[in-house]
């Protein structure tokens, strides 16, 4: 959506190009504009081109806006300009182009209807174009013409509307701007864009920081989840093997070999161990299984009076680093001789 300039004077009653225009003529221009506005779009443009008498030149000129409304007040004709690129809006507002000129079609036919006065274009006149000639957004639109037959086109050099004495005369104003003034106008028009780009760059940088932090946090979370999964898997296997040792379907020495075979100490392999298969292998009964899993989750101080279970609990608690379970079990027995004797007596050994 472009900018708008409303209520701009574009024409007046009087004698222009040896043609006499009355209030009725202005009303006719307004009426025809309303009748044709849905199919005949009237452009706002820079100047009339090298030869405004030839349609081929007019058709190729870029539109810098459109006439959205035409109305009369007294003996003057006014128009609203719409869809102006911001740069053009700033240039007009800063009075680089103060003079306008209209193009009228006379006695033309369209779809079998006759029109005496048809507004065909409004041109901005000025002596200095460099401030806007190189701007890309001026090429965004092309002037659209409804095809009329018959009649002729007349271009009026400048806006009429300044009164001297009792007659209205054509007044052409020329404004000379030096390069510094033109540059100031361009800077004024483009500064909001520069500020906006700076803010966008700042927002993008902040967004990248946020994304990097989010990615890092997500990676940390994933790592912790994996560690917890490994921990739970290892504990589940260990609980089953503890129950197997208590049931004497697995000795501490064989337990160590079995742990190596199934990869209890391997983070990748331990989470893939089939627990049900391990239980079946060592014939872990449901009641014993539940007892073993339950005790492994209790505090060591709450272990039952069974010396074997106490030794197993202490072994798990005191196991160091990559020490084998068998080595840890032996070291625990040596550190707790009374408990070791009780364990041997309970198993009929000396």
Image (cartoon, helix red, strand yellow):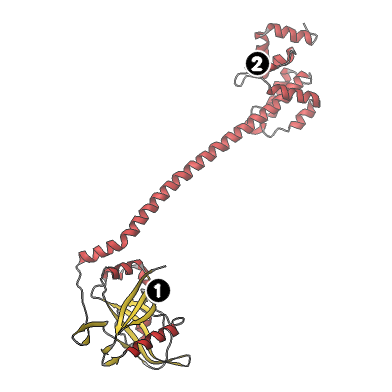
In the picture, the quarter occupied by the C terminus is top right
Q: Nearer the viewer, residue 59 or 95?
A: 95
Q: Nearer the viewer, mark 2 or mark 1?
A: 1
Bin the neighbour count of mark 2 within 10 Å (Cα to Cα): few under 14, some 14-19, many 20 and up.
Answer: many
Q: Is residue 269 found left or right of 250 in the rendered image?
A: left
Bin the neighbour count of mark 1 within 10 Å (Cα to Cα): few under 14, some 14-19, many 20 and up.
Answer: some
Above-or-below relation of 124 to 137? below
Q: Indicate the position of residue 180 as horizontal and vertical percent values.
A: 20, 64
Above-or-below relation of 38 to 202? below
Q: Nearer the viewer, residue 55 or 332?
A: 55
Helix, strand or loop at disc 2?
helix
Say whether residue 2 is visible: yes
What residue is pinned by disc 2?
A: 328
Helix, strand or loop at disc 1?
strand
> Residue at 36% of width from left, 56% of height from top?
196
Q: Indicate the position of residue 103 as horizontal and vertical percent values.
A: 33, 85
Residue 141: which numbered mark, if any? Answer: 1
Q: Give the quadrant of residue 299.
A: top right
Q: Give the quadrant of residue 162.
A: bottom left
In this view, the residue farthest toward the front is: 74
Q: Give the quadrant of residue 159.
A: bottom left
Q: Is residue 184 found left or right of 42 in the rendered image?
A: left
Q: Indicate the position of residue 25 as horizontal and vertical percent values.
A: 34, 90
């Amino acid at each position: 959506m472009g900018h708008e300039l409303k209520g701009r004077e574009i024409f007046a009653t009087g004698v222009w190009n040896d043609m006499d225009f009355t209030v009725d003529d202005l009303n006719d221009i307004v009426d025809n504009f309303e009748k044709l506005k849905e199919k005949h779009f009237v452009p706002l443009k820079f100047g009339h081109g090298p030869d405004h008498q030839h349609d081929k030149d007019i058709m190729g000129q870029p539109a810098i806006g459109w006439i959205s409304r035409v109305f009369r007040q007294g003996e003057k004709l006014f128009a609203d300009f719409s869809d102006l690129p911001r740069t053009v809006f700033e240039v007009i507002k800063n009075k680089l182009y103060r003079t306008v000129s209209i193009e009228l079609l006379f006695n033309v036919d369209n779809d079998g209807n006759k029109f005496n006065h048809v507004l065909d274009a409004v041109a901005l006149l000025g002596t200095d174009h460099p401030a806007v000639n190189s701007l890309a957004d001026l090429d965004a639109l092309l002037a659209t013409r409804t095809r009329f037959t018959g009649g002729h086109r007349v271009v009026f050099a400048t806006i009429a509307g300044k009164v001297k004495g009792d007659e209205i005369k054509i007044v052409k104003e020329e404004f000379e701007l030096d390069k510094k003034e033109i540059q100031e106008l361009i800077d004024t028009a483009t500064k909001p864009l520069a500020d906006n780009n700076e803010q966008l760059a700042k927002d993008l940088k902040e967004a990248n920081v946020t994304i990097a932090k989010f990615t890092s946090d997500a990676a940390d979370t994933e790592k912790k989840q994996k560690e917890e999964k490994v921990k739970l898997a290892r504990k589940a296997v260990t609980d089953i093997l503890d129950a197997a040792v208590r049931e004497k379907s697995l000795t501490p020495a064989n337990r160590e070999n079995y742990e190596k075979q199934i990869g209890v100490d391997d983070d990748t392999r331990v989470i893939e161990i089939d627990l049900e298969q391990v239980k079946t292998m060592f014939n872990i009964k449901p009641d014993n299984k539940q007892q073993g899993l339950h005790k492994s989750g209790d505090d060591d101080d709450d272990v039952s009076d069974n010396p074997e279970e106490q030794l197993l609990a202490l072994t798990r608690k005191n196991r160091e680093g990559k020490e084998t379970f068998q080595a840890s079990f032996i070291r625990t027995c040596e550190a707790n001789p009374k408990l070791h004797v009780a364990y041997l007596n309970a198993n009929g050994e000396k």
